[in-house]
Each structure stands twice: as structure tokens, then as C-alpha cells.
Image (cartoon, rainbow, N blue to C red):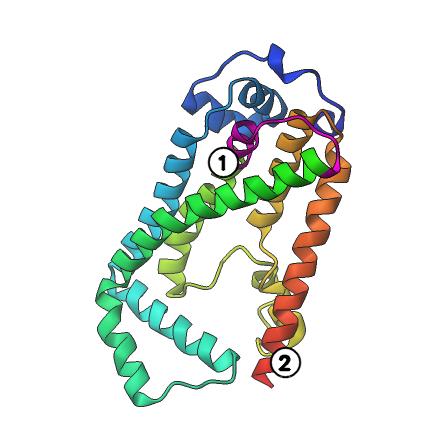
Amino acid sequence: MTDLAPTTAPAEATPKGLVSRVVGVFFSPRATFASIAANPKALGVLFLSTFLVAFGLYLLLQTQVGQDAWIDQQVRQSEAFGRPLNDQQYNGLERIAPIVGYIVLGGYLVVIPIVVAIVSAILLGIFNALLGGDATYKQVIAVVSHAGVITALQGLFAVPLDYARQSLSSPTTLAVFLPFLDENTFLARLLGTIDVFQIWWLLTLSIGLGVLYKRRTTPIAIGLYIVYFAIILAIAGVRTALSS
């Protein structure tokens, strides 16, 4: 794969418009990230991705199907941590359900940019301070923001499936391929945490960072995947321990 090879200097890349950059992340990520690194712009694509994810979920939660699915999700999560809801708590969820779409919409519009900013700062520190890179924060946050279009696509893909399934559990995790597993087991929880789109996002992010720092994609991807799987193993382990 050409995306796994060292990259040329990003300063030689031609500037691209927003639509070209979004499309390019999917179909020609290496050339697109070279353009992004040379001409870093994060605000437009960050707003677009955040809005698509937030508004799609908002529309779902405006329906009765979405609200019932949200209530069911809260009940399941509480039971998974060993805290079954009583009648009063359940009635409270029913009162909140009609407005939860607005809460989620506002929360996502605030939280997602903050998370992107924090992740960008962490990556900048790792690659600049520890690995001797010289990229700017503006370049890193532009790369992270553009990699985020993968999660926006996930949102567009998941919302209609969630409505059809009447569930807010992710339809793109590995657990979907093994529906016969007992959902209370460690394996089921682990597979239910591994999301295909998140794996794709990490690969795209690795390509972007490789272009920006003129490094091979493979070592970067391996490092990100190690962190990712360490986190999901911890999450699955904690959820299984608490549920028992």
C-alpha cells in the first residue's frame, strides 16, 4: 500500500476545498493529508463532522422509537454496572426522554470539539516532544479533525439502522457478527466495544500523522491500536467485574 510508505514534504501539496478534502480522506488520504498539512484548516470540517453526528442522533431521539431505545439503553447500562433502576428512577427517565435529543445535540456540539482539541494536544506532545517532530498545533488539529469524517460517516450509517433495530447500541461493532453470545460475558462485552469504524478512523488518523511527520504509517497505526485495545480491554473487564 502506498499509504504505508514515507511521504514527501507536505509543503508541496496543492490546497483543496472543504468538499475535496472530505472526499479525499476516503478515496486518496495520503494526497489529501499532504494538502491539509501544508494548508491546515480545521474549523469547517470539524463543524461539519460534529453537526452531522449530533444532528443525526438528535433526529433519532425526537422519535418515539429513539426515546424508547434511549430509555432501554440507560436501563441496560445501569444493570451492567450492578445498579438496577427502581420505579422512581425509571419514571424519571421517561420524563427526560422527550428532551434528551436537545441535551445530546447541545452536549455533542460542545464536547466533540473539546475532545478533538485535547487529542490533538496529546498527539502534538507525543510526536514533537518525544519523537522529535516539528509540526504545529494547527497542523495536528487539522489532521485530527479531517480524520473525524470517518466518525461522521459512522453516524450517518448507524442512525437509520438504530431506528430499524429500535436500539442505540452500535450496529458496527464486532458483536453484531456473533449475536448468539451471552451479552453478559467478557467476550461479548469486548466484541461489543470494538467498532469497525473506530478501527478505520485510527488507520486514517495514522495515515494523516504519517504524512504530517514524514513517518511510515504502520508503526503509528500499531501504536494507536495498542492504546485502543488496551482501553477497550479495560472497559470490558471493568464492566464484567461490576456486573458480577
Marks 1 and 2 sit apart, C-alpha to C-alpha, by 35 Å
Residue drawn at point x = 70 percent, y = 29 percent = 133
Q: Secondary structure at mark 2?
A: helix
Is the C terminus in the top left, top right, bottom left or bottom right quadrant?
bottom right
User: For the magenta stretch, what is the residue range?
Assistant: 130-145
Q: What residue does disc 1 label?
A: 145
Answer left or right for 32 relative to 99.
right
Q: Is residue 143 magenta?
A: yes
Answer left or right for 191 relative to 96.
right
- Tell me where residue 26 appears, x and y as whole percent: 54, 31
Q: Is residue 111 visible?
A: yes
Looking at the image, residue 27 lies above or below residue 105: above
- Tell me where residue 114 appears, x and y as whole percent: 44, 46
Q: Is residue 93 magenta?
A: no
Looking at the image, residue 177 lies above or below residue 136: below
Q: Mark 2: which amino acid?
A: Ala
Q: Nearer the viewer, residue 220 or 69?
A: 220
Residue drawn at point x = 45 percent, y = 79 percent = 78
Looking at the image, residue 48 lies above or below residue 227: above
Q: Nearer the viewer, residue 202 or 56?
A: 202
Q: Mark 1: which amino acid?
A: Ser
Residue drawn at point x = 70 percent, y = 16 percent = 8
Answer with mark 1 or mark 2, whichever residue precedes in sequence.
1
Is the N terminus in the top left, top right, bottom left or bottom right quadrant?
top right
Q: Are marks 1 and 2 in contact (CB under 8 Å)?
A: no
